[in-house]
């Protein structure tokens, strides 16, 4: 069974830092690209960042570029999001979500097929 | 960035009746590989999003066949043939054709 479990959320002051983790199990983590998506309280979904299976390709939303860093450790089946210079508007539930496998050059497989339960980040003084 | 616009934003539906949600993208979602990476997600209250439909019309594993997707280019539709109580929630379209991936605003489906 595919499982994604986020952790690391909490209350942090504006300007502070936090590191989120996403532990993956039930599939070959090293074969899949991954994403972080967030949802502010009562709001819709916002894509945050993408990392390819080998970490060779990384993308960020403009709203977090230069402040957030996505990374992964395939040996530990884990995805990370280092968040620096946090702002009030970064307050949200942060989800990790699976993307395509690296061998899917034809786009056969679905992406965003599995999501974690999310971890809440609250930025407030 | 590709803007995804959903209508309606709220859809009160009678149990057993159909529901339909439209999603329009600001530019074509046809990828250079020939696929159209338009998906539909369901988010029940208090739950993470769940994939329903991918590449316009492909139902994900375990999704009931009362859910169907259609469309092409820039115009897409999610249909629920007969709404059940468990279908209450917010539905999002999303595109993964061009970075940044983007989502529609969400459509709230509720029972009348």
Image: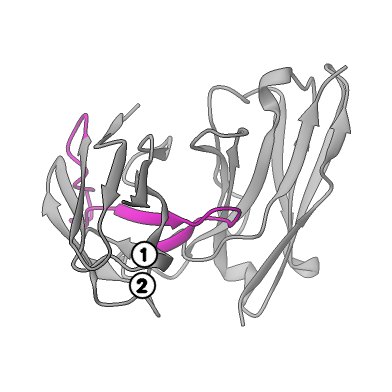
As drawn, the label of residue B60 is 2
Q: Answer whether residue B32 is magenta in the image.
A: yes
As drawn, the label of residue A92 is none
In three-dimensional space, the C-alpha distance between marks 2 and 1, rounded to whole angstroms, equals: 5 Å
Q: Which residues are magenta?
A: B25-52
> Residue B3's spot in the image, x, y percent?
30, 29
Q: Classify mark 2: helix, strand or loop.
A: loop
Q: Earlier in the sequence, mark 2 or mark 1?
A: 1
User: Could you classify mark 1 by the number of other residues whose Cα lies within 10 Å: few (under 14), some (14-19), or many (20 or more)?
Assistant: many
Residue under the point 42% across and 67% down: B86
Q: From this view, report whether residue B110 is shown above or below residue A41.
A: below
Q: Answer whether residue B20 is magenta in the image.
A: no
Q: Which is the main secondary structure of the residues drawn in magenta?
A: loop
Residue under the point 53% across and 23% down: A62
Circles 2 and 1 on the same subunit: yes
User: Could you classify mark 2 by the number of other residues whose Cα lies within 10 Å: few (under 14), some (14-19), or many (20 or more)?
Assistant: some
Q: From this view, report whether residue B95 is shown above or below residue A77.
A: above
């Amino acid at each position: 069974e595919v499982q994604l479990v986020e952790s690391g959320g909490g209350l942090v002051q504006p300007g502070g830092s936090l590191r989120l983790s996403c532990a993956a199990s039930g599939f070959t983590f090293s074969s899949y690209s991954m994403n972080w998506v967030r949802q502010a309280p009562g709001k819709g979904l916002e894509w945050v960042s993408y990392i390819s299976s080998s970490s060779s390709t990384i993308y960020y939303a403009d709203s977090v570029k230069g402040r957030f860093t996505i990374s992964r450790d395939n040996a530990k089946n884990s995805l990370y999001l280092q968040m620096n210079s946090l702002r009030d508007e970064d307050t949200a539930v942060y989800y990790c979500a699976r993307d395509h496998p690296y061998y899917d050059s034809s786009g056969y497989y679905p992406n965003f097929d599995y999501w974690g339960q999310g971890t809440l980040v609250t930025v407030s003084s | 960035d590709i803007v995804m616009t959903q209508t309606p934003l709220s859809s009160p539906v009678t149990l057993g009746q159909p529901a339909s949600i439209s999603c329009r993208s600001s530019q074509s979602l046809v990828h250079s590989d020939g696929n159209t990476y338009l998906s539909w997600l369901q988010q029940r209250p208090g739950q993470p999003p769940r994939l329903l439909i991918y590449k316009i019309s492909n139902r994900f594993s375990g999704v009931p066949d009362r859910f169907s997707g259609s469309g092409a280019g820039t115009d897409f539709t999610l249909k629920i043939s007969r709404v059940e109580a468990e279908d209450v929630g917010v539905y999002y379209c999303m595109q993964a054709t061009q970075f940044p991936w983007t989502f529609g605003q969400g459509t709230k489906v509720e029972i009348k």
